[in-house]
Image (cartoon, rainbow, N blue to C red):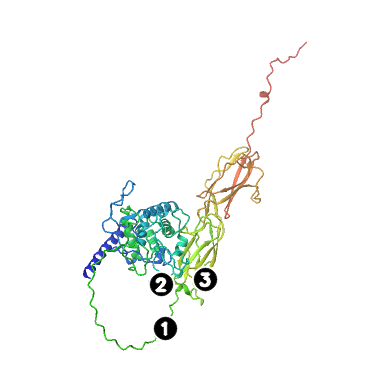
Amino acid sequence: MSAHFGTRLRKGAVNTTVAALAVAALAASQAPDVTADGHGRQTAADAPSAADSGTGTESGATGNSPYYTDLPPLNSPNPAPSDGSSAPPAATGTNEAGIPATVLDAYKKAEAALAQAKPGCNMPWQLLAAIGNVESGQAGGGNVSADGTTVTPILGPVLNGVGFANISDTDNGAYDGDSTYDRAVGPMQFIPSTWAWAGRDGNGDGKKDPNNIYDAALAAGHYLCRYDWDMSSTSGMRSAILSYNNSTDYLNTVLSWLEYYRKGTHEVPDGSGSVPGNRSDDGTGFTPTLPSVPTAPGTPSTPAKPATPAKPATPAKPSTPPKPSPPAPTPTETVDHLEYAGTTSLTVMAGSTSTDRVATRAETAAGKTVAKVRIRFTIVGDTDTTFTGGETVATIATDSKGVALAPALRAGEKTGDFTVRATVLGRTVTALDHKATVTARAADALARTGDAALTCTAGGEFATRVEVKATYKGAAAGKVAATATLVKSADDQSANDKGPYFKDAAGNAVRTLDLRTDADGLLALPALYADDTAGTYLLRITTTGGATLTLELTVTAATPDPAPSESASSPASTEPEPTASGS
């Protein structure tokens, strides 16, 4: 017993040292917003909360299921080649540093896909590898088929509230085989309700399978990158990891493996990777179908001497067992209906993010608010609007006042009405619909960028071109529709039939143009020309949203050519004039 206890102490010392090094390395390499004590633990000022994680939910991607707690060894692997060449073969490096070939390929493909889809996230494949190791030991040591699907399912414990979260079935057992409660599924351990909106097709087979490492790795990357979190900053990475599993120990374990993999790793054959042996729940309730490792046969023990049978005691009269009390209902089971906790409808301009947010309150039949209930918000309708994380579904837990606040809406370019629908996960309750509308991009002010007089001689071309800038609430109003019209007068806004004009593609005179500001709100009008009518004219520019600007144009009469003189037009006479005769 003492030897075993000593081994555990030494192992704990090693793990604490690795965690300290990992947190210190992350803080040094990224940003100064992570603090740690001398043992690599976060300080009390840095303790995570649901608000820190940015999700407002307690269950995360995995339902806060148990995870592998093994930390990497102190001796880091050799750094990866700096010339971009392939890593060494499986024979080199430590077993812990090696990642099964198909699994490693899935992480790197997910990194490449996210670099295109969400470049601001800066997702490193090593973070996906760290989470994959902590969640499933790299898919059970790479126990996957050629297309990346686990040979046997990897399932977390039944989330029935006994030692774990209480999450009623959301997929009718389609992913986890349990139609009563949910279980975390696959190499990245997604619970079915999260996979329903976060799932991705990472291997291009037309399916979103949580048991496929390509699909699961890409889904994990998108999940971590929502809410515009940036993995190149410590705060962004910390929030993302805590949203996956809201535990400081989980955070530190993932960061330890992240720093380990950053210092180098290599590819090992599928099925030959090492599987961690320690879990946050000590294996209680966890039934992953991973490949078993044969153990060496032990020395048979000497059979114990049979004990002398005791004299049977007089049997006591059996007592009536107490009737078990029914289990207390979960918060979800007490929800009777949903109520609006704020605006019932909202409006957002195309290309912008809403300032108002949809809020829903969960209540019992008696009108009492219910905390810790998961509300799913879904964007429904023909729209390209998403939540700020780029998703159309978000799951948020109600706070102490029973209110779940959806992420802000980010409008696309498609205008019109749609719905944000709130439902209760794990319970059949009438959905609550919030109406939303996307309006066209607008400007509320227009101003010229120059002040040169707009003048022209009749029959000529204006030397100065008109350029204006559109703004909305003081900010540049990009991609806003505008109309430029040469009007008859200040009181008559119809198009003039004389005076200055634009030219269409065929060179014909036109006096109304439909235009659009550029991304910086600038609107450069084409050249203006004048007909033969001198005078003062008006150019009126209007935009969606009501911005108006009227400019004065002046056309001066052309200077006539000087009339020819009589002497210049008649030839001089060469004949002598007649003289008077005196005779």
Q: Residues within 10 Å of mark 2 (few under 14, many from 20)?
A: few
Q: Which residue is mark 2?
A: 161
Q: Which residue is mark 1?
A: 323
Residue 423's tag is none
Q: Position of residue 32 (x, y in %)?
A: 33, 58
**Three-letter amino acid code at disc 2?**
Gly
Displayed quadrant of residue 561: top right
Q: Position of residue 246 (x, y in %)?
A: 38, 65
**Three-letter amino acid code at disc 1?**
Lys
Judge left or right: residue 214 versus residue 510.
left
Q: Which residue is mark 3?
A: 429
- Label 3 sits on a secondary structure element that is loop
- Label 2 sits on a secondary structure element that is loop
Q: CB under 8 Å between callouts 3 and 1?
A: no
Label 1 vs 2, first from the N-terminus: 2
Judge left or right: residue 476 versus residue 302.
right
- Alpha-carbon distance for marks 3 and 1? 32 Å
